[in-house]
């Protein structure tokens, strides 16, 4: 009974670690997507602004 109590936290420590790593990877993937979207939007705004200032 005592040995089971000793082993259980070890198993619990390993499982959430792999799950949290996956979670962190998903977060970074989402952040990368957001950065790309923002960068593309900024490029479009710059092009639109450049075209507008050229006409002035």
Image (spheres, helix red, strand yellow):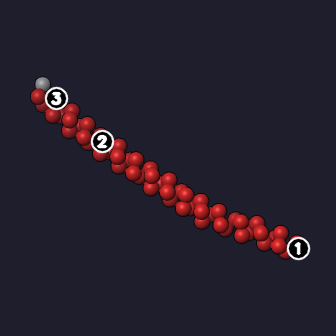
Toward the right, the furthest residue is 1
Which class describes the residues within 10 Å of circle 3: few (<14), some (14-19), or many (20+)? Answer: few
Give percent across and percent down for residue 29: 44, 55
Name which residue lies at 32% across and 45% down.
39
Q: Are marks 3 and 1 in contact (CB under 8 Å)?
A: no
Where residue 41 sits in the image (x, y, percent)?
A: 30, 41
What numbered label is drawn on residue 41? 2
- Choose the circle earlier in sequence order: 2 or 1: 1
Crowdedness of circle 2 by 10 Å Cα count: few (<14), some, many (20+)? few
Q: Earlier in the sequence, mark 3 or mark 1?
A: 1
State which quadrant residue 45 falls in: top left
Q: Which of label 2 and label 3 is nearer to you? A: 2
Q: Secondary structure at mark 2?
A: helix
Question: Residue at image x 21%, y 33%?
Answer: 49
The residue at 40%/47% (across/down) is 34
Residue that appears at 35% across and 46% down: 37
Asked whether the residues under the numbered discs 2 and 1 touch, taking CB atoms below 8 Å apart as contact, a structural biologist would say: no
- Vertical position of residue 56 compared to residue 22: above or below: above
Looking at the picture, does residue 34 appear above or below residue 21? above
Which residue position holds label 3?
A: 53
Which secondary structure, mark 3? helix
54 is higher (above) or lower (below) than 33: above
Nearest to N terminus: mark 2 or mark 3: 2
Q: Quadrant of the N terminus?
A: bottom right
Alpha-carbon distance for marks 2 and 3?
A: 18 Å
- Nearest-to-viewer mark from 3 and 1: 1
- As drawn, the label of residue 54 is none
Q: Which residue is mark 1?
A: 1
């Amino acid at each position: 009974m005592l040995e089971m109590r000793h082993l259980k936290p070890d198993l619990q420590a390993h499982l959430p670690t792999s799950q949290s790593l996956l979670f962190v990877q998903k977060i970074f993937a989402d952040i990368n997507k957001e950065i790309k979207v923002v960068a593309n939007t900024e490029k479009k705004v710059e092009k639109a602004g450049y075209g507008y200032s050229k006409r002035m």
